[in-house]
Amino acid sequence: MLALNETWYLVLAAMIFTIGSVGLLTRKNPLVMFMCVELMLNAVNLTFVTFSKALDDIAGQAIVFFVMVVAAAEVVVGLGIIVAIMRRRQGADADDISLMRG
Amino acid sequence: MKVEMFTFLLTAAICLAGSAGVVLLRNPVHNALSLVATLFGVAVLFIQQGAYFLAAIQVIVYAGAIVILFLFVIMLLGVDKAEGLHSEPILGQRPAAIAAAVAILGLSLTALLSVGSRVTGQASTLAAIDGSEPNVNALAKVLFTDYVFAFEITSVLLTVAVVGAVVLSRKAGLAIDVDEFPEGTSSDLLQAKRDAAAEELEVAEEVATDDETPEGEAETTEEALR
């Protein structure tokens, strides 16, 4: 049986990242696009933690901490923008909001 | 090793199924719940690699706060209906997306698998995980020494995000639209209650002073008797 090493984690992270990017490129609901961005961020976080363990360096985990904070702030502001847009146009999707006007 | 491998494979299956659900399911609520599955899976993988603090943060912040925020917005906006997928305005968007996916996955898998199981790079000398102190202590030590400036900036970022969210989610224009409250705003109601209470107090004081006058007269009569 194959031994569990870093490559397994990195391959899994690459798969999650790819699935997230496909969702971001194909879905049109802005909320779902946001969720796909979260998927990609999580894949990168997993990569960071894997390298942190492989290279025996806690700094990788510190970076993940900051990524999580930025992701939380990004979600708050992004959902605020989506709510502001959706109030004006019910059922708007990403094609309707291609202009930077509400 | 067998237990670790089993845990990894199970968690990886959950992660991949969850992320596929985020992309493929039509209902946004189902998408959010699939996202929770993936986030929990990643938390398990964090624990497996010794990042205990990050695993806890992952569950509390991501699964506990961010996804709940998503669900709140979904329910608030009422967009929990299935998305119409028949229209595709940009010609060839899907094939292009699939091509991009193949490119990303192929490139990263080639890079990962061509080097075998080795991870290139140098092991840390300054912030090594030597196992002598718990994960939380080690992370805290790094966060409050090497990255303390970034840590402080983070608090500014969160404050900016909160202010931005409040400004964005307020209705454009005036602070409060009074037409929404036919009986007046809550501050108006409070002021009215305060006025009523003050009037009652005045009436009560007047009654009290009326009561006092006979006593005063009685005192004067007593003094006169002396």
Image (spheres, rainbow, N blue to C red):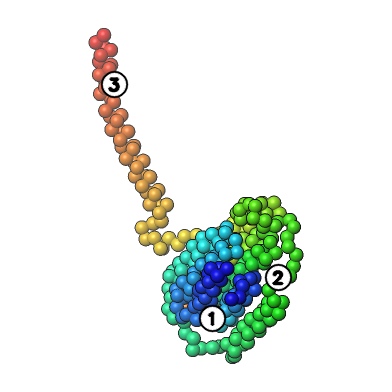
Q: Residue B211: x and y, percent?
A: 26, 28
- Disc 2 to disc 1, C-alpha distance: 35 Å
Say which residue label 3 marks: B216
Say which residue label 1 marks: A27
Tag 1 subunit: A
Q: Residue A11's image quarter?
A: bottom right
Question: What type is the residue that disc 1 sits on?
Answer: Arg
Residue pictured at 50% horizontal, 65% vertical = B63
The reply to whether residue A17 is in sight is: no
Which tag is nearer the camera, tag 1 or tag 3? 1
Tag 3 subunit: B
Question: What type is the residue that disc 3 sits on?
Answer: Gly
**SS at circle 3:** helix
Residue pictured at 38% horizontal, 52% vertical = B189
Which tag is nearer the camera, tag 2 or tag 1? 2
**SS at circle 2:** loop
User: Would you say the residues marked 3 and 2 are in contact, meaning their CB atoms lie under 8 Å apart?
Assistant: no
- Disc 1 to disc 3, C-alpha distance: 86 Å
Mark carried by residue B190: none
Q: Is residue B54 left or right of residue B112?
A: left
- Disc 3 to disc 2, C-alpha distance: 99 Å
**SS at circle 1:** loop
Question: What type is the residue that disc 2 sits on?
Answer: Val
Q: Residue B89: x and y, percent?
A: 55, 88
Q: Nearer the viewer, residue A101 or B127?
A: B127
Q: Residue B66: x and y, percent?
A: 52, 65
